[in-house]
Amino acid sequence: MRQLLTGGQVFREGAFHPGDLVIENGLVAGAGVSVSKFESGNSIDCRGLFILPGLVDVHVHLREPGFSFKETIATGTAAAAAGGVTQVCSMPNLSPPPDGMEHLQAQLKAVRRDARVRVTPFGCITRGQRGAGELADMEAMAPYVAGFSDDGRGVQAEELMEAAMRLAKRLDRPIVAHCEDNALLKPGGCIHEGRYAAAHGHVGISSESEWRQVERDLKLAAKTGCRYHVCHISTKESVALIRQAKAAGTAVSCETAPHYLLLCEDDLGEDGRFKMNPPLRTAADRDALLEGLADGTIDVIATDHAPHTAQEKAKGLDGSLMGVVGLETAFAVLYTGLVKRGVLSLAGLVEKMSLAPRRIFGLPGGAGPGQEADLAVFDLDGEYEIDPETFLSMGRATPFAGWRVQGRNMLTMVKGCVVWQRNTQKR
């Protein structure tokens, strides 16, 4: 089967070039100013549009099995497709958590049945994903997972994390760490321990609770030689520590999320849609993250898409559960907030949202010759207002509700098959 995407701006060799893209039997067969020598079976007019390698989100909560009242694999991957995301790595905050093959197989079966885009799970670091106790059956799960994480919980004991890193090193899989030192947390902490918390009587979450564990783990990663990836960094200290570790040759990568790059505690309101973990930090932290993004300290932008029910997010900052959604908004808010303002180039955004996550986690697909055709086609002039009621995700809580943004996804393709198209998608 042959398909032709015509007249678009095609991303190749690090930049966008005008031309056509040929897909044959699910693979990218050719790209150039004119590929008319290929007879097109199905032709898609992409004039005025930008053809990107499909976005990759390495931090997504699909909630199934165990929490399908919040999200399902079907709804979460539909949301991903709508946002131009062709591959997600799913976090292990599930019931039962994937801490061995029996539990992992239940998740993989549901993925094969219902996923609209590629899904590669993370396995747990510890049994029951408790962040303590004994290690999960990492060896059995290794061939089927992108790495190992206890996302939502930091691994508290240094000795246990060192053992996990040594095993992960032998299995050639990364440790993907949610860094949080429980000894530095106060009961009821809901937002950053800063100006807004003090003014409104909220219990704060200190920056040190994140960066202290980053500091510990970086020393362990250097000691063990393990590949180490830090989840959703939010503090200036974390940026500085990771920058230093990279300069010293430690095999570390890291991610942050759109809300940490575009918002800070000054943007908070008394609404559950502003509550996530880690919390929005200070303007100085946000600026340090932007600097780290620009100088390469921060490798990846991921959403930490974490859907909850409307009731769970309707109890203000103190009572709501932590987590916001982002699969359907990430590209547009970043294009509008970073690229349009000259903070990051469009090619740089593609690097952080598509190329780097594939490279770090060894994931397939893209828009290059011979690759399985995982593509997203964006109208960069398409302007709209973010309306959570139109989301395909079951989650509605986003700090970007009401924002006017540019960058509307028009079509998503996985392995050469169209999995979402705006003109025909029922919403």
Image (spheres, rainbow, N blue to C red):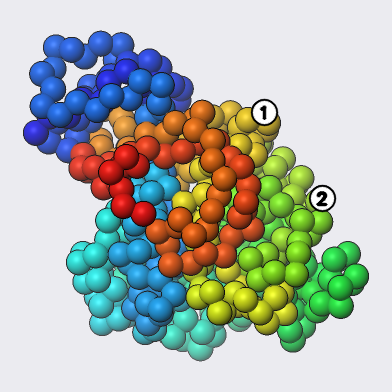
**Which residue is rendered at x = 44% and y = 31% of the image?**
379
Q: Quadrant of the N terminus?
A: top left
The secondary structure type at the circle numbered 2 is helix
Residue toward you, 264 or 167? 264
N-terminal-most mark, 1 or 2: 2
Left or right of residue 282, residue 317 in this image: left
Q: Amino acid at mark 2?
A: Ala
As drawn, 147 above or below 360? below
As drawn, 33 above or below 130? above
Residue toward you, 250 or 241? 241
- Which residue carries the number 2 mark? 284
Foreground tag (1 vs 2): 1
Residue 206 position within the rendered picture, expressed as x and y whole percent measured from the top left: 78, 70
Disc 2 crowd, CA 10 A, few/some/many (<14, 14-19, 20+): few
Q: Is residue 141 visible?
A: yes
Residue 47 position within the rendered picture, expressed as x and y whole percent measured from the top left: 35, 20
Between the residue at mark 1 and the residue at mark 2, the CA separation in whole angstroms equals 19 Å
- Which residue carries the number 1 mark? 342
**Which residue is rendered at x = 63% and y = 66% of the image?**
273
Q: Is residue 168 visible?
A: no
Disc 1 crowd, CA 10 A, few/some/many (<14, 14-19, 20+): few
The secondary structure type at the circle numbered 1 is loop
Residue 100 position within the rendered picture, expressed as x and y whole percent measured from the top left: 32, 80
